Amino acid sequence: MSEGAEPEIWFYHLERSTLDQVLPELLDRTLKRGWRAQVRVADPNRLEDIDERLWTWRDESFLAHGRADAAHAARQPILLVQAAETPPAENPNGSQTLFIVDDAEIGERKGWTRCFIIFDGQDDRALAGARERWRTLKAAGADLAYWKQTDEGWTRAA
């Protein structure tokens, strides 16, 4: 991706699954593409939960990752970032993908290939925030897609 290009921004509307179920799957697919990922979280408690979940994702495997506030952050294939502690423009591990959780700010969009905004459809505040974010990004001319859970899996709805 060229340095000045805007990323695709994909909204993932969780209706049937939890973040703990969906995020590791998306991160696994990202790594299989040969990409690195940054997961940006607003809530420090959620960061702890995600950190633990990635180590225990499957009985037979884990997703290698590290935290931005730890040593060797640049070497991590998946980097966990607390939004309040790391400026949104920073990309210490050279990630192609950015995962936004808990209303964390996207920050500068240039330089990413794809951005995932994951929100809980059962949480009225999260749903309203995602709708507002969609309107704002759409007005700015962003390349958006909306993914919805169905009985068959994920379906692109917009």
Image (tube, helix red, strand yellow):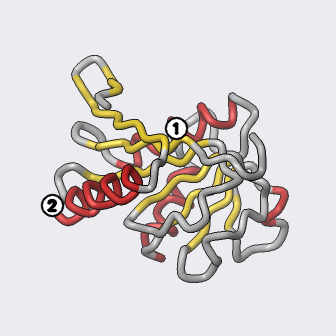
Residue 51 in the image: state x and y as whole percent.
Answer: 56, 61
90, above or below 31, in the image: below
Residue 114 seen by the camera: yes
Residue found at x 25% / y 55%: 131
Marks 1 and 2, Cα distance to the nearest angstrom?
Answer: 24 Å
Label 2: which secondary element: helix
- Image-based side of 148 in relation to 124, left or right: right
Label 1: which secondary element: helix
**Quadrant of the image occupied by residue 32:** top right
Residue 149 in the image: state x and y as whole percent.
Answer: 27, 31
Residue 134 in the image: state x and y as whole percent.
Answer: 33, 52
Residue found at x 21% / y 49%: 121
40, above or below 155, in the image: below
Q: Nearer the viewer, residue 75 or 130?
A: 130
Q: Nearer the viewer, residue 110 or 67?
A: 110
- Image-based side of 25 in relation to 5, left or right: left
10 Å crowding of disc 2: few (<14), some (14-19), many (20+): few
- Image-based side of 72 in relation to 110, left or right: right
Residue 64 seen by the camera: no
Residue found at x 25% / y 61%: 126
Q: Please give the label number shown on residue 26.
A: 1
User: Tag 2 or tag 1, which sits nearer the N-term?
Assistant: 1
Residue flagged by tag 1: what amino acid is it?
Leu
Q: Nearer the viewer, residue 2 or 87?
A: 2
Q: Nearer the viewer, mark 1 or mark 2?
A: 2
Residue under label 2: 124
